[in-house]
Amino acid sequence: MRICIVYDLLFPHTVGGAERWYRNIALGLAGGAHEVTYLTMRQWNAGEQPDLPGVRVVAVAPGMALFTGGRRRILPPLVFGFGVLRHLIRYGHRYDVVHTASFPYFSLLAAAAVRPFARYRLFVDWHELWTRQYWREYLGPLGGRVGWWVQERCLRVPQSAFCFSRLVERRLLAEGVHGTVTVLEGQLPEGDVPKSAAAVQPEQPVVVFAGRHIQEKNPVAVVEAVAKARETIPELRAAIYGDGPERPNVLAAIAEHGLEDVVEAPGFVENDVIEHALSRALCLLLPSRREGYGLVVVEALSRGTPVVLVHGEDNAAVEFVAEGENGFVAPSAAPDALATAIGQVAARDARLRASTLAWFARNASRLSLERSLMTVSDAYQSR
């Protein structure tokens, strides 16, 4: 089968859950004897070739700065959407399937515009579905209305929709997406599951944050929570991995609380550093208000490491938490609330790690990437 995957970013040139998802499905499908093309923006130097064995990577747009002031810029999605349109007008008839992310929207609209002529089947991943209120918060009253309207146009495109949480499934059905909806719960490759997780215990009480430093993920709250929790757990430390617009605020908070010797924030690091840190952590602390999935949460749980998340109407990652069995969901990202949850983890340390491992053992199959790849492949064949 000839498959075209469409996403503007490419792992590891940019790091995130969606980037890893598209890299993994591209490699998985190519390994299954499919002919796979990956349309993206150029993120590598001239003369280099992206490391995606067996996959034809095509840059349909130049590399561009994606963010300004912590928000996605409008121009790159427009340029990428035009590049996708131009490519599919010329080559779309060669594909049996076009599989695209819903975001950044214009690429989906381009694929929908060409489909009647090229006659490929269209599959769309909805990592998130924003509410009207969130659009207003993100882009302001006018920009929010435009963003909502564009998102609505994408929902009206006839499609086979995939999503990664029950939260987004409910929203897609409520908004009347024009097509079927299938939930893909698994994104964790089997090779990423440690074989000896049961033997790993935290070397010291360290909470770990890993993710992009943006307002929605709220990395500053980690510093404030640790400062508060150290009133009752004086030996508590933290490691904050990642980078982004909020990084200066993270460093300023560390200095403000005098935690330079307690909280490390090295920026982006190699993946094996994060894997080791998660395995040895007291808990993963992710005070994000918005998550469409939360792969780092699954990665932590697979290592027997409990998680502390925050309740929020846009936070689908809380679907992974069995309260008191594999972590806790704090009612807010306030320092007191997060510190209380950290204290609950510390109080049940060994018992909570054991029950976290038991929870993951029961759920490993449904959370595996391989199961999602099988579902995707079956969907391609059946429609």
Image (cartoon, rainbow, N blue to C red):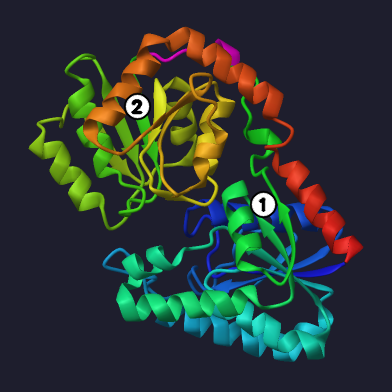
Residue drawn at (56%, 20%), measured in percent from left and top?
356
Where is residue 354? Give x, y as percent.
56, 12
- Give amino acid for label 1: Asn
Name the residue at 56% across, 11% down. 199
In the figure, residue 68 lies in which quadrant? bottom left
The residue identified by callout 2 is: 207
Q: Which residue is mark 1?
A: 24
Main secondary structure of the magenta stretch: loop
Q: Secondary structure at mark 2?
A: strand
**What whole-number distance in Å separates the C-alpha atoms at marks 2 and 1?**
28 Å
Above or below, comparing residue 7 to residue 171 in the picture: below
Relative to residue 214, is residue 172 drawn left or right? right
Look at the picture and state if 234 lies above or below 239. Answer: above
Callout in the foreground (2, 1): 2
Q: Residue furthest right?
A: 382
Q: Residue 58, image x and y in percent?
A: 64, 75
In-image side of 164 versus 247 (left or right): right
Over which residues does the magenta segment extend? Answer: 198-203
Q: Please give the label number shown on residue 216.
A: none
Find residue 194 and report its image quarter.
Answer: top right
Mark 1: few/some/many CA within 10 Å (<14, 14-19, 20+): many
Three-letter amino acid code of the residue under disc 2: Val
Q: Is residue 320 above or below residue 48?
A: above
Q: Is residue 6 visible?
A: yes
Residue at horizontal 54 percent and vertical 70 percent from the top? 8
**Which corner quadrant holds the C terminus?**
bottom right
Measuring from the top left, give residue 167's x and y in whole percent. 57, 50
Visible residue check, residue 101: no
Was residue 294 drawn as part of the magenta stretch in this picture? no
Disc nearer the start of the sequence (2/1)? 1
Q: Nearer the viewer, residue 359 or 203?
A: 359
Q: Is residue 201 magenta?
A: yes
